[in-house]
């Protein structure tokens, strides 16, 4: 009897964790890196908030924080823009992968294309 109760409790806890992960979706803190053409590695961090199909939040790199603008989410695909401290508008597009808990993202910085994979930041 105790064994059945323990197994049932473990299954319920596992189900609760899976449901929480699904509902967390793209919301949260994500981090990754890009490498510039001159070999410099830059860490990127995004704090993303989703409300229906609207995506907002902030992005951070090199100690500078910028707002996410014009963000939208359709299914697993998303787009948004950030404007850096020099006034350059930087389009982002990507896809959220719930099973791997990762984000594949493309960034267009003045015509230079970057691709990165972001991982959920648990800090």
Image: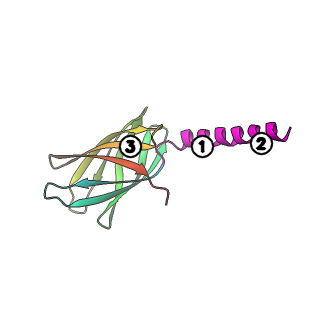
Residue 61 place in picture, x, y as percent: 31, 61
Please tell me the numbered disc located at residue 20: 1
The residue located at (42%, 34%) in the rendering is: 76
* C-alpha separation, residue under disc 3 versus residue under disc 1: 18 Å
Residue 83 place in picture, x, y as percent: 27, 55
- The reply to whether dot 1 and dot 2 touch (C-beta < 8 Å) is no
Range of residues picked out in magenta: 1-27
Mark 2, other Cα within 10 Å: few <14 / some 14–19 / many ≥20: few
Q: Which residue is mark 3?
A: 103
SS type, badge 2: helix
* C-alpha separation, residue under disc 2 versus residue under disc 3: 35 Å
**On the picture, is 37 further left or further right than 13?**
left
> Which of the pair 90/112 is nearer the observer?
112
* C-alpha separation, residue under disc 1 versus residue under disc 2: 21 Å
What secondary structure is the stretch in magenta mostly built from? Answer: helix
Quadrant in the picture for residue 44: bottom left
Q: Which residue is mark 2?
A: 6
Residue 85 falls within the magenta-colored stretch:
no
Chain-order first, disc 1 or disc 2: 2
């Amino acid at each position: 009897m105790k064994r059945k109760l323990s197994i049932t409790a473990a299954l319920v806890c596992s189900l609760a964790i899976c449901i929480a992960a699904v509902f967390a979706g793209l919301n949260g803190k994500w981090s990754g890196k890009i490498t510039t053409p001159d070999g410099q590695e830059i860490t990127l961090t995004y704090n993303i908030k989703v409300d229906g199909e609207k995506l907002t939040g902030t992005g951070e790199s090199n100690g500078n924080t910028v707002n996410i603008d014009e963000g939208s989410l359709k299914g697993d695909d998303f787009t948004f823009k950030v404007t850096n401290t020099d006034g350059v508008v930087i389009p982002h597009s990507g896809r959220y992968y719930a099973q791997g808990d990762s984000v594949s993202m493309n960034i267009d910085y003045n015509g230079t294309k970057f691709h990165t994979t972001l991982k959920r930041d648990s800090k």
